[in-house]
Every structure is written in structure tokens, then in C-alpha cells.
Amino acid sequence: MKLPFRKKREVVFQKVKSQEGFILENQDGKLTDFRDMDIEDYLADMFVTPDQFVILSAPVPQNKIRFVQACTHDGEIEVELGIEEEGTRLYYKMCSEKECYGIFLDFYENRFVPQMEEYKPVEF
């Protein structure tokens, strides 16, 4: 028996509550007191360790971005943005290590303005 065909669709998540400061996390835990070097270390580990991820959440949205997250797939780096409007929608793009570092560090410094035409909605 075949399952009925389902269209892929965007998923809208609930907005994240405001928090005190930035949160940096991976599968090993989360940090609330960290520096840009810690972000670089988390990303460097993700680039060489399978099934790693890194999430950097802002206390409040910056240019509508609530968080940036990244993981690797078959040697490629996928960066996702959590865009907050009426809910939170995920947008992604594949990028280089250098670009991934830039996105995370610029977001941490509140100077990241994405070129949204480079990103596609994450669909499930």
C-alpha cells in the first residue's frame, strides 16, 4: 500500500522567549558566558566531527533573525537562519567554512544583514 502523496511545506515555529544574553550551544551543551573565540572553536569542531551542530541565539531578534545554526551534510556546510515574524521560519543555504564563520561572528556582533535571495525556506 502506498502512502498518499504529501507536499513539502514550510513549518512555522513558535517565537523564542527573550533571554538575558546570547546562548551558544552544540550537542555537548550550552554556554551563556563566551567570547567570539568560543564560537570559532565550536564551528571548527563541527567542520571535522560528523553529526555536530552549532546554534547561536540572540537575546532578541536582530534584523528579524532570532538565531543562526549550522551543521554539515556530506562534507558541505548548511547554515540556517531562524527568521522571526508572526512565528519563526527557517531559511538555509550551503556555504564555505569562511562564510559560515563570518555569518556567526557578524550575527554575534549584531552586524549581520543576510542577502535573503541567497536563502531558501526549509521544508519538511
Image (cartoon, rainbow, N blue to C red):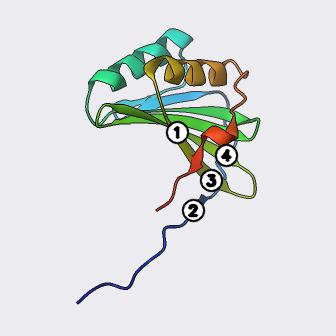
Q: What is the residue that sits farthest to the top in this orientation? A: 37
- The local secondary structure at tag 1 comes to strand
Q: Amino acid at mark 3?
A: Arg
Q: Amino acid at mark 2?
A: Glu
Give how far across and how far down residue 97 sits, in percent.
44, 20
Distance between mark 1 and mark 4 Cα atoms? 14 Å
The answer to whether the residues at label 2 and label 1 have Cβ atoms under 8 Å apart is no
Check disc 2 and report the residue beneath it.
Answer: 10
Give how far across and how far down residue 35 sits, in percent.
55, 12
The answer to whether the residues at label 2 and label 3 have Cβ atoms under 8 Å apart is yes
Q: Nearer the viewer, mark 4 or mark 2?
A: 2
Check disc 4 and report the residue beneath it.
Answer: 83
Check disc 3 and report the residue beneath it.
Answer: 89
- Among the 4 quarters of the image, the one containing residue 18: top right
Q: What is the residue that sits farthest to the bottom in this orientation? A: 1
Decide which of tag 4 and tag 2 comes sooner along the chain: 2
Decide which of tag 2 and tag 1 comes sooner along the chain: 2
Q: Is residue 8 left or right of residue 45?
A: right
Residue at image location 49% in from the left, 16% down from the top: 98
Mark 2 is surrounded, within 10 Å at the Cα level, by few (under 14), some (14 to 19) or many (20 or more) other residues, namely few
Judging depth in this view, the residue of 31 and 75 nearest the camera is 75
Residue at image location 32% in from the left, 84% down from the top: 3
Check disc 1 and report the residue beneath it.
Answer: 93
Task: Please determine whether, in this image, residue 97 is positioned above or below residue 35.
Answer: below
